[in-house]
Amino acid sequence: MTQLPSRLIVFDGVCVLCNRFTQYVIKRDSRGQFFFTSYQNLLDNAANFQLTLPENLDKSITYYRKSSCYQGSTAVLMIYKDLYSWFHWSQLGWLVPRFMRDFFYFRVAAKRYQWFGQLPTCPIPTEDHKDRFL
């Protein structure tokens, strides 16, 4: 694959919280619209996609949606919007100013290993979902 998928979620492959979120999205993505990669893998393959990586790729979930790149709380809200549509309770998060959403998002992100744990290596996707991982 040399072209970036239209909906790509980049997550920390060794973070337990990030992996749980990825599994949550996979289970609910009945249309198969999302693709996934760990930031560790993306760092190795960024040149293949001619992709400019954001500075804090390792500190936040990143969501590439068509030609846009979202991070932090905005990335999560956009993923939920694409997963469920605008008419989902999660979209109430847009009512909170971004600086407040990101304040809490990055506090949790900074403590994610301490609170949720860290895996020794990135998990290998199951055969059912292998085609959705870069």
Image: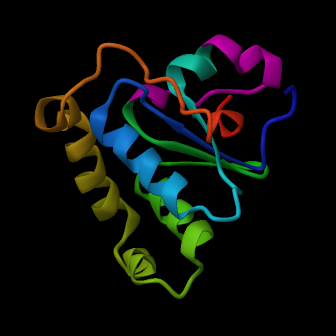
Q: Please, is residue 24 above or below residue 69 in the view?
A: below
Q: Name the residue rendered at 53%, 88% in the picture.
A: 87
Q: Position of residue 86 (x, y in %)?
A: 57, 82
Q: Farthest residue toward the left?
A: 115
Q: How many marks?
A: 0
Q: Farthest residue toward the front?
A: 127
Q: Which residues are magenta?
A: 44-58
Q: Farthest residue toward the bottom?
A: 87
Q: Name the residue rendered at 54%, 60% in the picture.
A: 79
Residue 50 in which image quadrant = top right
Q: Name the residue rendered at 40%, 83% in the picture.
A: 89
| Nearer the observer, 101 or 113 | 113
Q: Position of residue 92 (x, y in %)?
A: 39, 82
Colour pattern of the rendering: rainbow
Quadrant of image for the C terminus? top right
| Nearer the observer, 16 or 75 | 16
Q: Position of residue 96 (x, y in %)?
A: 34, 75
Q: Please, is residue 70 above or below residue 59 in the view?
A: below
Quadrant of image for the N terminus? top right
Q: Is residue 109 magenta?
A: no
Name the side, left or right, on which 1 lies relative to 55: right
Name the side, left or right, on which 55 lies relative to 104: right
Q: Position of residue 5 (x, y in %)?
A: 78, 43
